[in-house]
Every structure is written in structure tokens, then in C-alpha cells.
Image: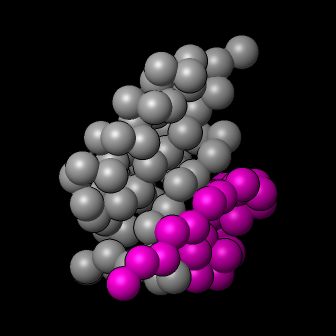
Amino acid sequence: MTRRILIVDDDEHTRTLLRDFCEQSNFVASVAPDGEQIVAKLDQFRPDLVLLDLVMPNKDGFAVLKEIRTEPSSPRRKRRWPSCARWTR
């Protein structure tokens, strides 16, 4: 069974580095550049793991987590999403 990882980071170099590493490790990886695109990708890609940058323009990782948790009709809310957060200054 192939595992899916969704990588969300506004830094293109970081996204590419993480995607390449995941693919070399036999994972299927998809990327999103910001929090605006992640919600749709969660439903379409259905990842097993989300690597989420917390500090991003437009919609940051904190807003994404809040939206996933508080949207009562969303199927995403019923699923536990293992995640790894990165916070840099």
C-alpha cells in the first residue's frame, strides 16, 4: 500500500526538497504553496500524513488547523491527520 504525504510550505525550495525526499523513500507526495489550497487538496489527495508549515502568507497553518477542526459537516473533521509542523523565523 502506497502512503501519501501532503507537503504545505510557502518556500518553494523546502517543498521541492521534502517532495523529492518523500518520493525517493517510496511515498506519493503532493505539494501546496499555502493554506488556501490545502483544504481542497485534503479532500482530493486524501493524505496519510500532512507536513504543514505554520507560518505562511494568506492562510497560515494555524488557520488551516482551526478550519479543519471546526467545520462540522466536513469529512476531514472525522479523520485524524498525523502532522508535522515547522515554525521558523
Tell me where residue 47 sits by quadrant.
top right
Examine the structure image and report whether residue 50 is included in the region drawn in magenta. Answer: no
Q: Position of residue 75 (x, y in %)?
A: 67, 56
Q: Position of residue 83 (x, y in %)?
A: 65, 58
Q: Position of residue 50 (x, y in %)?
A: 57, 52
State the residue at coordinates (66%, 40%): 48
In this view of the protein, which residue sits in the foreground, 73 or 84?
84
| Residue placed furthest toward the front | 89
Is residue 82 in view? yes
Examine the structure image and report whether residue 75 is included in the region drawn in magenta. Answer: yes
Q: Is residue 88 left or right of residue 12?
A: right
In this view of the protein, which residue sits in the foreground, 8 or 16?
16
Q: Is residue 34 above or below residue 46?
A: below
State the residue at coordinates (53%, 54%): 51
Identify the image quadrant of the C terminus: bottom left
Q: Is residue 36 above or below residue 45?
A: below
Q: Which residues are magenta?
A: 64-89
State the residue at coordinates (77%, 57%): 80
Q: Position of residue 5 (x, y in %)?
A: 55, 39
Is residue 37 in view? no
